[in-house]
């Protein structure tokens, strides 16, 4: 096994400061690179990442240690018939007519079912903000919106919303802990345990007396005689709370950064709402919230002229593939007018930016994320036409596995 010694380590401070410069070098010098600090191969070109997502040798066995300690055994780990059967039980409740399973009598139109929940939470969070106020829009809005929406879908008590945020924050810390900090690890494990204990009596009550919420829908779902047991429901709820919140939260942070650092972009999108989805789609391409996904090889595979041994850990570096110069023109620029990215497919398994994965392991929550991002941005454009960055504030991205601005101080 050879390495390019002149390249920095993935887990180094240099890469943490600017991972995109590192990925640019990898695409050019070592598109398949073994990184000793992570103990993994890094795939960095768009074509290679696309192939890996579809290749059966790239398994999700790494999730046994990356995700299972906090999620339980989730859909992300399953393959073959087990994955297909369990996904069939869950997926109808996240798209299409199946959304009616937890909609109750809120709306009759399927598109309005999801939007109505998001709109209520958006109004709740934005109503207290007053003209001229300076604040962190991530802390007051983006961090809370997806957590509160999911809690609403699950019909969990509003008095407990802050507890969900605390659990979510600790578990996301666990999932992003590439450096294996033991304190972060223990906090994540404890939060997952507390959440599962909290859910146990709720699931029992919903089984006995189902309502129109998502937990009731999962508890009563049946496909070909198969149902979900309590532990599987806990796993899906935990996964939804984390994965469904983190991507939206961090996408909002990057989106505000792109639109406000060159404020004419914000004004352009405000004037033409057909640009809302392209602005979000381009954010997902250029600055995806999840920067990489792991895989473990079931057999040896040749990629880019190099043999990767069986049992190797491989990181599909989404953040690099999305900036591949051979796939996207002017790939490192934010351009919501670009024509080499299908914005219509940005929230589907056909998406070309990999922000929600690809193929059979495409994120179930993409439709929910689209609704939250689109409705949230539209509401902010409507309410705060003068929104701008606070004087002297410059957004700074943080994180490696998950990356976005940690703060976004604005004035409305």
Image: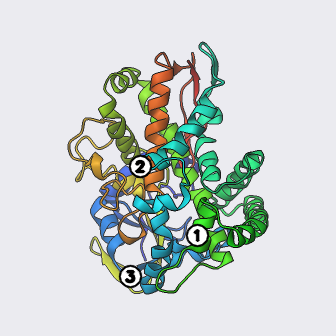
Mark 3 vs mark 1: which is more N-terminal?
3
Task: Quickly name the residue at label 1.
Answer: 218
Task: Quickly name the residue at label 2.
Answer: 109
Task: Quickly name the residue at label 3.
Answer: 57
Could you tell me how far apart the alpha carbons at marks 1 and 2 are, in whole angstroms?
Answer: 21 Å
Could you tell me how far apart the alpha carbons at marks 3 and 1 are, in whole angstroms?
Answer: 31 Å
Q: Where is 241 relative to 371, above or below? A: below
Mark on residue 299?
Answer: none
Check disc 2 and report its element: helix, strand or loop.
loop
Q: Position of residue 66 (x, y in %)?
A: 60, 69
Number of the front mark, 1 or 2: 2
Query: Which quadrant is the C terminus positioned in?
Result: top right
Mark 1 vs mark 2: which is more N-terminal?
2
Q: Position of residue 131 (x, y in %)?
A: 59, 14
**Residue appearing at x 34%, y 52% in the figure:** 322
Mark 3 vs mark 2: which is more N-terminal?
3
- Lateral position of residue 329 relative to residue 78, left or right: left
- Inspect this view and state whether residue 47 appears: yes
Tell whether label 2 touches label 3 (CB within 8 Å): no
Q: Where is 193 relative to 267, above or below? A: below
**Residue appearing at x 38%, y 24% in the figure:** 270
Check disc 1: other Cα within 10 Å, few if <14, some if 14-19, many if 20+. Answer: many
Q: Position of residue 397 (x, y in %)?
A: 54, 39
**Residue appearing at x 34%, y 36% in the figure:** 334
């Amino acid at each position: 096994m050879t390495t390019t010694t002149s390249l920095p380590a993935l887990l180094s401070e240099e890469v943490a400061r600017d991972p995109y410069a590192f990925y640019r070098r990898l695409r050019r010098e070592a598109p398949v690179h073994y990184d000793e600090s992570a103990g993994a191969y890094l795939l960095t070109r768009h074509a290679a990442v696309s192939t890996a997502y579809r290749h059966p040798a790239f398994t999700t066995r790494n999730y046994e240690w990356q995700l299972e300690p906090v999620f339980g055994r989730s859909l992300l780990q399953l393959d073959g018939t087990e994955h297909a059967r369990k996904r069939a039980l869950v997926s109808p409740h996240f798209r299409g007519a199946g959304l009616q399973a937890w909609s109750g009598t809120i709306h009759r139109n399927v598109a309005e079912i999801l939007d109505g929940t998001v709109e209520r939470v958006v109004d709740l969070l934005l109503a207290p903000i007053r003209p001229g106020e300076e604040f962190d829009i991530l802390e007051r809005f983006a961090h809370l919106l997806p957590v509160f929406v999911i809690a609403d879908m699950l019909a969990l008590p509003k008095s407990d919303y802050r507890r969900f945020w605390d659990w979510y924050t600790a578990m996301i810390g666990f999932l992003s802990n590439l450096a294996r900090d033991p304190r972060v690890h223990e906090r994540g494990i404890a939060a997952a345990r507390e959440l599962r204990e909290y859910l146990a009596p709720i699931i029992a009550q919903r089984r006995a007396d189902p309502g129109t919420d998502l937990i009731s829908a999962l508890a009563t779902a049946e496909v070909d005689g198969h149902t979900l047991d309590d532990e599987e429901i806990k796993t899906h709820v935990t996964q939804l709370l984390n994965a469904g919140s983190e991507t939206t939260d961090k996408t909002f942070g990057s989106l505000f950064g792109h639109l406000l650092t060159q404020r004419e972009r914000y004004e352009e999108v405000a004037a033409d709402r057909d640009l809302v989805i392209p602005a979000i789609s381009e954010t997902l391409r250029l600055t995806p919230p999840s920067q990489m996904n792991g895989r473990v090889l079931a057999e040896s595979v040749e990629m880019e002229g190099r043999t990767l041994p069986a049992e190797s850990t491989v990181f599909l570096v989404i953040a690099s593939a999305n900036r591949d110069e051979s796939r996207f023109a002017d790939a490192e620029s934010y351009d919501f007018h670009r024509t080499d990215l299908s914005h219509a497919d940005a929230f589907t398994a056909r998406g070309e930016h990999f922000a929600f994965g690809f193929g059979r392991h495409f994120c179930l929550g993409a439709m929910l994320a689209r609704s939250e991002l689109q409705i949230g941005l539209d509401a902010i454009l409507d309410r705060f036409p003068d929104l701008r960055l606070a004087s002297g504030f410059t957004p700074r991205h943080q994180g490696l596995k998950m990356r976005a601005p940690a703060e976004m101080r604005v004035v409305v």
